[in-house]
Amino acid sequence: MINTYKENKDDLLVAIERFELVAKATHDVIWDWDLVNGTVWWNKGMESIFGYASEEIKSGPDSWYERIHPDDQDRVIRNIHTVIDNGENNWSDYYRFKRSDGSYANVHDRGYTIKVDDRPVRMVGSMRDLTEQLKTEKAHRESEENLTFALEAAQLGIWNTDPVKQTIAFDDRCKQLYGNPKEEELTFENLMQHIHYEDRERVKAAVANALNPDLRNLYDIRYRTVGATDKILRWLHCRGQAYFTTDGTPYRFSGVSRDITYEISNQEKVTWADQQAAMTIEGSGAGSFLINADSNVIIHSPTMARIITGREELNITREMFINHVHPDDLQTRLDAYSIAEKTGDLKYEARFVWIDGSIHWIRVIGKYLFDSSGNTKTISGIVMDITDRIESEQKLRKSEEKYRQLASELERRVQQRTEELYQTNLELINSNNNLQQFAYAASHDMQEPLRKIQSFGSRLSAVYSKELDENGAFMLSRIQDASKRMSAMIDDLLAFSRLSTHDGNFQPVGLNQVVKDVLADLEISIQEQKSNITVEPLPAVWGISSQLTQLFQNLLSNAIKYRKPEIPSEINISFRVVDENEKSRIPKLLDDQSYICVEVSDNGIGFEETYLDRIFQMFQRLHGRSEFAGSGIGLALCKKVVQNHHGYITARSTPGEGSTFMVYLPVPKD
């Protein structure tokens, strides 16, 4: 019994010693949680890995709880207690653990439950800092993503070949370049069948040189493929290299492929364009030349000889070329060559003397071609006969001079006429001012005798009415009525004359208030005529309040006045927004201004629309004074108000059915 106890004690001491050695040797944080006494022991890893001194760490489990990241705390604590409460053996979790400097480490924590009588009494575990590992993995992923992005951006396909097994591995892009062959076709021999038959031997030779251990050439080749399934012809540029074992055996052959079909197509287009250009030059009547800078030998077309000398069969030398330049233009040629030596571009126009003695204007355009040292190798260019153009330009200059003289004379006359118009405008302004002053003075001067006529007429009627016979009373009544009409007409004329200027500043004016005030002024007339007036909600407009009041006063007065006998008068005021289509059809509206159309409708006597223009003129009446009172100025005043607001007024009517007056007014800008 004693021996058994001793053996168990020795085993325990050995286990404890081994645990301490493991705790010291490992790079992990080792912990031992006494579930019965509620204490936790930490090894030196807490200091070396997380920076906590032993005196900073409490003995209870709070020393662990408090350092778990707040976002992970509930989950981790709940999971470990579930393992303990359920009597499970193992616990593992990933979370963030706080270092002494306040930063957080990403850790992998694992615990193992120790039980006595099937009851957990201890949990021993290790915590590993995965921060650097995760950073490395992240950097590796980013590197792979960058490589993948670069390959995709460059549209490169990757291929790997096993020279021993003769198999090939393609990525998706590489498969596309070969027309998506089936996986079982990805062998060297099968792939050769998808390479253009004219390029196969060249490709095989390049592959053999790359796999030859004695040569080990870089694989760099351009060839055509015919798509395995789509049968599309593509040009590919492939680059790669072989990898060899120590004994010189190739074990891997890999590289990238790029679609250069577009580049090859462009090169073919350039070649075709060069050919077309040569034909175009000759077809346009220009001559071409190429000068060897070292030997001064000129290679030229027959057209160039004809343009320079007048004869195509001549073989032009550079000396002959210079000899045909007009003596007065030799310096022009030398100056052009001096500039061309610096810029590489040769351009000048000069006269050339043909063999028959005639003079022709020639344009020379060329390009210097330099070698790697900057020395001129060749000069290529064209020559064009521009005699017709020069002569036309000379004629044009003469014509332009003539037109300049005419334009100068026209400008002088326009300026003179403008000054005359300015003076006339000043005179017109003075005349208008005088007329306004006259109208104002005349109205006041005429009102005075009218007031006396009205006053004495009233006295006569009051004092002597009994002494007048029926004819005398009738004539006195006519005198009073005429004086009243005259007074009303003078008031209307004065109001109209004042509208010739904008008597007020433009501002937003609410039409609801304007109409409300007008209806209040017309209250007695409305009651007498038994008119029913409906006013829909109206917006604000951009205008002058006093003039808009006159506008609606006259429109509503007419609607009330011109009613059908014995029929109740129905008057409606509404509005609508004017769209661009309608606006384009209305004259004199501003392009940059929005408008509404206010409609004043009635069921009165109406009128023939043939008189539409007439009703807006001064003193124009469609009915006699005995039928309807008035001065004949009201609608003319309405038209003037609307014109002052850059608007428009019109009407539609049917005799016996009523009228609708439509007023287009601007609205305030936002």
Image (cartoon, rainbow, N blue to C red):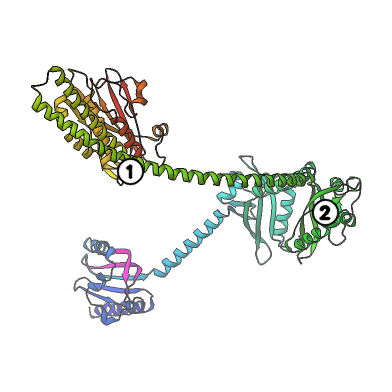
Image spot of residue 329 (x, y percent): 82, 56
Q: Quadrant of the N terminus?
A: bottom left
Which amino acid, mark 1?
A: His
Q: Which residue is mark 2?
A: 290
Horizontal arrangement in the rendering, residue 660 relative to residue 458 (left or right) = right
Local crowd size for mark 1, using a 10 Å CA cut-off: few (<14), some (14–19), many (≥20): some
Furthest residue toward front: 467
Q: Main secondary structure of the magenta part?
A: strand
Q: Secondary structure at mark 1?
A: loop
Residue 407 seen in the figure: yes
Which amino acid, mark 2?
A: Leu
Which picture quadrant has residue 85?
bottom left
Residue 281 on the magenta span: no
Image spot of residue 138 (x, y percent): 44, 63
Residue 97 on the magenta span: yes
Number of marks in picture: 2
650, 279: nearer the viewer: 650
489, 271: nearer the viewer: 489
Q: Secondary structure at mark 2?
A: strand
Image spot of residue 566 (x, y percent): 17, 17
Residue 192 seen in the figure: no
247, 647: nearer the viewer: 647
Which picture quadrant has residue 338?
bottom right
Mark 1 and 2 residues: CB-CB less than 8 Å, in contact? no
> Image height check: is 84 above or below 436?
below
> Image height check: is 262 above or below 585?
below
Horizontal arrangement in the rendering, residue 572 relative to residue 332 (left or right) = left
Q: Which residue is mark 1?
A: 502
Residue at the spot 29% in from the left edge and 26% down from the top edge: 660
Please report whichever mark, 1 or 2, sits nearer to the chain's N-terminal start.
Answer: 2
Magenta residue span: 88-116
